[in-house]
Amino acid sequence: MSQGEPGVELDTSVGYMLKAAASALHSALEAVLKPLGMTITHYSCLELLAQRPGLSNSELARGTFVTRQSMNVLLQALERQGLVVRPAQAPVGRALPTELTDRGRRQLKEASAAVRRVEQNMLADLSAGEQDQMRRLLTTCIASLTLPPTPAP
C-alpha cells in the first residue's frame, strides 16, 4: 500500500471472500443457465414474477439489481419470446404489471431446477445448522450495510 498504510489481508478479508464467493456463484449460475438460453437477470426476473405476479418494471429492476432501463429492455425481449405479458396501458398510474405466461412458467421450472442444483452443490459441505447460520449472518451483514444506522444514545 502507498504511504506506509496497511492493506487489507485478502486471505482473511470477509468482504473479499464474499466477492470471491459471489463471483464463483455467478460463474456457476451462468454455466447452467446459458444452455437454457437465459442470463442470471432473465432467470431472476422470471423467478420474481412467479413469486410475486404483477410486479412493475421498477420493482423487477430493484429485485434483480439492474437499472430500470435494462429491465425494460429485458421485459420487451421476454414479451417477444412469449414468456411474460404486460397490459398495453397501465391499469393505475404508469406502472405496467408483468405476469408470466405458461411458456414462461415452463422455462422457469427447468431453470429453477438447475439453479437449485448449483446452490445445493455450494452448500453440500455445510450442515443444516451451518446453512441456517450462514443465512442469518448474511442477513445481518446486508442489513448493516443497507439500513440507516441506529442513533447513539
Image: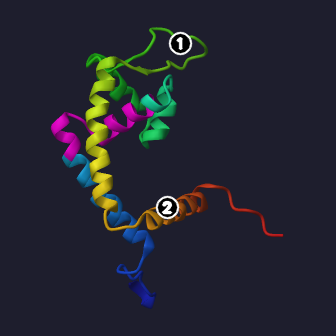
* Residue beneath the point at 38% across and 84% down: 1
Residue 34 location, quadrant: top left
Q: How is the image coloured?
A: rainbow
Looking at the image, is mark 1 or mark 2 earlier in the sequence? 1
Residue 131 location, quadrant: bottom left
Q: Residue furthest bottom?
A: 4
Residue 70 seen: no
Query: Label 1: which residue?
Result: 90
- Residue type of the residue flagged with mark 2: Asp
Q: Residue furthest right?
A: 153
Magenta segment, which residues?
Answer: 32-49
Q: Residue furthest front?
A: 128
In this view, the residue in front, 102 or 70, is: 102
Residue 5 seen: yes
* Residue beneath the point at 59% across and 55% down: 146
Q: Residue 64: percent from the left, percent from the top?
A: 42, 40
- Mark 1: secondary structure: loop
- Residue type of the residue flagged with mark 1: Ala
In this view, the residue in front, 44 or 67, is: 44
- Residue 152 vertical placement versus 3 (above, below): above
* Residue beneath the point at 45% across and 67% down: 130
